[in-house]
Amino acid sequence: MVTIIVLATRNSGKIREFQQLLKTFPVEIKGLSDFGPIPEVEEDGETFDDNAYKKALFTAKALGLPAIADDSGLVVEALDGAPGVQSARYAGENATDRENIDKLLMEMKDRDDRQAAFQCVISIAIPSGPALTYEGRCEGQITQEPKGASGFGYDPVFFYPEFNKTFAELSSEEKNQVSHRGKALKEVVAEFEKIIVWLESHLAEAKPPKPDHTQFEHNDWSKDKMV
Ligand code: ITT
C-alpha cells in the first residue's frame, strides 16, 4: 500500500528533495500546491518545535492526510538565542536576506563571543494529533562580514570551522552533508521504515481521516478534490 504524505510547503525544491530522498519507500510525497488554496499557517510558536508541529498538524487536519513540516533558523548565543524563530523576519516582516544579515552583524558588532548554530526541526503529524519529531543542529560562528554567494538566508555570515568556509562558500552537496536540515533529513530517512509502520498503525486507529473544513478561513476550493 502506498501512503500519501503531504509536505507542508509550496517550495518545489524542498518537495523534490524529499521525493528524491524517500523514493525507495512506498510513499507518495505531495506538496501543498497539489491540493488547491490553503491558508498560510502563522508561525508564531516560541520554538522551532512548536512551529514545525503547528504547520504539520494544521496541514494534516486540513487535508485528512499525514503531513510533514519543517522549521529552522539561526540561534546566536551572545544574542540569547536570537534571531531564533524570528530568523526569516529578524529585520522586519518581509525583510530580505541582506537586511536580516545587516541587522545581525550590527547586533554582533564588538561582540567577541560569535558562537552560533543552525537548528532544524521536522515534524510528521497525523490528522488526529500525534506526531514524530526529528532535529538537526550545526555549530559555527558568525563572521565579521558576508562571504560567498551560494545558499540563502544567513549562509554568507555562518562560518563552518571544519571546512574553514562560510556556508555560502560550500556547494549544496557539501552543505547538505553537514547542515542542520541535512542531519534532520538523514535521521528521517534512517527511521523511515519505522515511520511508515507508525503512520499505518495510527491512521488505522483514527480511521477514517476526513478533511477538516473548519481549518480553512476561506473554504473556496473544490470539495471534490479533497474527499
Ligand atoms: P518555509 O516556507 O518552508 O517555511 P522559510 O523561509 O520560512 O520557508 P525556514 O523556516 O526553514 O524557511 O527558515 C527560516 C529562516 O531561517 C530562513 O528564512 C533563513 O533566514 C534562516 N535559515 C534556515 N535555514 C537556513 C540555512 O540553511 N541557511 C541560511 N539560513 C537559513
Image (tube, rainbow, N blue to C red):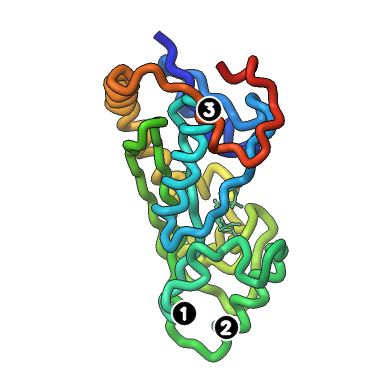
Per the image, label 2 sits on a secondary structure element best described as helix
Q: Quadrant of residue 131?
A: top left
Q: Which numbered disc covers residue 63?
A: 3
Q: Nearer the viewer, residue 88 or 170?
A: 88
Amino acid on which disc 2 is placed: Glu
Q: Residues within 10 Å of mark 3 (few under 14, many from 20)?
A: many
Q: Earlier in the sequence, mark 3 or mark 2?
A: 3
Name the residue: 33% across, 39% down: 132
Q: Earlier in the sequence, mark 3 or mark 1?
A: 3
> Where does the image place residue 118, in percent across and percent down from the top left?
46, 60
Q: Quadrant of residue 172?
A: top right
Name the residue: 36% across, 49% down: 135
Name the residue: 46% across, 36% down: 68
**Marks 2 and 1: in contact by CB < 8 Å?**
yes
Farthest residue to the front: give it. 214
> Where does the image place residue 181, in percent across and percent down from the top left?
47, 47
Looking at the rendering, in which quadrant would you find the N terminus? top left
Cβ of mark 3 under 8 A from ligand 1: no
Q: Residues within 10 Å of mark 1 (few under 14, many from 20)?
A: some
Above or below residue 18? Residue 108 is below
Q: Which numbered disc covers residue 107?
A: 2
> Where does the image place residue 116, in percent across and percent down from the top left?
44, 70
- State the separation of the CA atoms marked 1 and 2: 8 Å
Q: Earlier in the sequence, mark 1 or mark 2?
A: 1
Q: Is residue 209 visible?
A: yes
Q: Which numbered disc covers residue 79?
A: 1
